Amino acid sequence: MAFSQSVKTWAGQVRAPFLLLAVILVLIGGGVAFEDGVFNGLRFGLAMAGTVLAHIAVNLFNELSDYRTKIDENTRRTPFSGGSGTLQSGRLGYRSVYSAAVAALLSAFAIGIYLSWLAGWAMMIFIVAGGLATVFYTSHLAKWVLGELAAGVCLGTFVVLGTYFAMAGVLTPTVIWISIPPGILTALLLLLNEFPDMEADEQGGRRHLVIVLGRKKAAVVYTASLLIMYLVIIGGAVTGYLPMTALIALFTLPLAVKASVTALRHFDEFDKMVPALGANVGLVLGTDLLLAVACFI
């Protein structure tokens, strides 16, 4: 395999476009640290590297599980859901992907230990929680109706908190408050992406909120959660826990309306739900990025 083709194949396998979420989440924690005058370039860079590596590990372990359970063979793939299809195509072998997943996880853990040594061993709370969620997400959490919660906490809220703690060694009311919307958004990113895969996931042994509630009720939960997320941002700005600039995150409201209205109306129609998935991705990344920008400015 030519080098350029190999890079392209592995980029697809790790779902490279989705790694942007990890980058933006670290930017939020870095933005609050910058605002508070405790920003440290080295620790910020290490937090970024560790988080991206952990996200790569999550994606690879998820792909391996979906390959073993044949979930991805029964899904209708979209640009936002259904897996990469790389293992199914035979372009990469199971062992090489598994080795890459373990290497990424161990590398992220090593960075986490070093950051804990620098910032304080309480940092290990975030590292261990993230590691456990990475390893057990597909095999256990996604079967216990805990997948969305685990993703929201560990690949949302804890990334923001952990990044800030790596530089400051403490947590403040501001960083705790601003970490809540990203947690909700990460959970909702996963939730809406589960709509097209519901039947395949259920056949593969998974048990998540869309399976338990059904698509119609899950769409209501999605819409209500978006409302709560925006209220948290507004409430934080009004009470002073967040800078007033955080209100620029409200610019993503049109995307929220598009995604929620589409989900409520067309929850059971595959083709009509695809635009909602796209709007949801833009909503999640856009809102998180605007929160980061709000802190830096």
Image (cartoon, grey):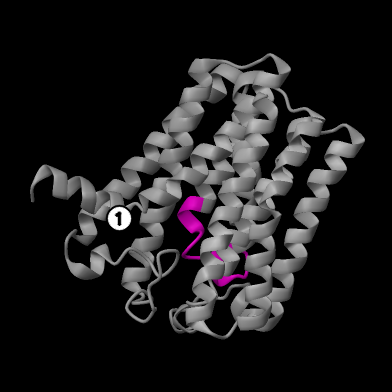
User: Which residue appears farthest toward the right when viewing the image?
Assistant: 239
Q: Is residue 159 left or right of residue 58?
A: right
Work out whether 49 lies above or below 235. above
Residue 25: image x %, image y %? 57, 39
Q: SS class of the residue under badge 1?
A: helix
Reading the image, the residue beneath label 1 is 13
142 drawn magenta: yes
Q: Amino acid at mark 1?
A: Gln
The one of 169 and 242 positioned closer to us in this rendering:
242
Q: Residue at x 69, y 28 (%)?
A: 295
Q: Can you say which quadrant of the picture contains the C terminus?
A: top right
| Relative image position of residue 151 (x, y in whole percent) | 58, 55
Vertical arrangement, residue 70 with respect to residue 180, above or below: below
What residue is drawn where x is 47% and y is 77%? 201
Asked whether residue 193 appears in the rendered view, the answer is no
Q: Within the image, what quadrant is residue 225 found in?
A: bottom right
Residue 238 seen in the figure: yes
Residue 39 horizontal side relative to residue 178, left or right: left
Q: Residue at x 66, y 81 (%)?
A: 265
Q: Residue at x 46, y 53 (%)?
A: 135
Task: Confirm whether the magenta stretch covers residue 184.
Answer: no
In this picture, which residue range is highlighted in magenta?
134-147
**Badge count:** 1
- Foreground: 278 or 197? 278
Residue 230 point in image, percent of width and height: 77, 52
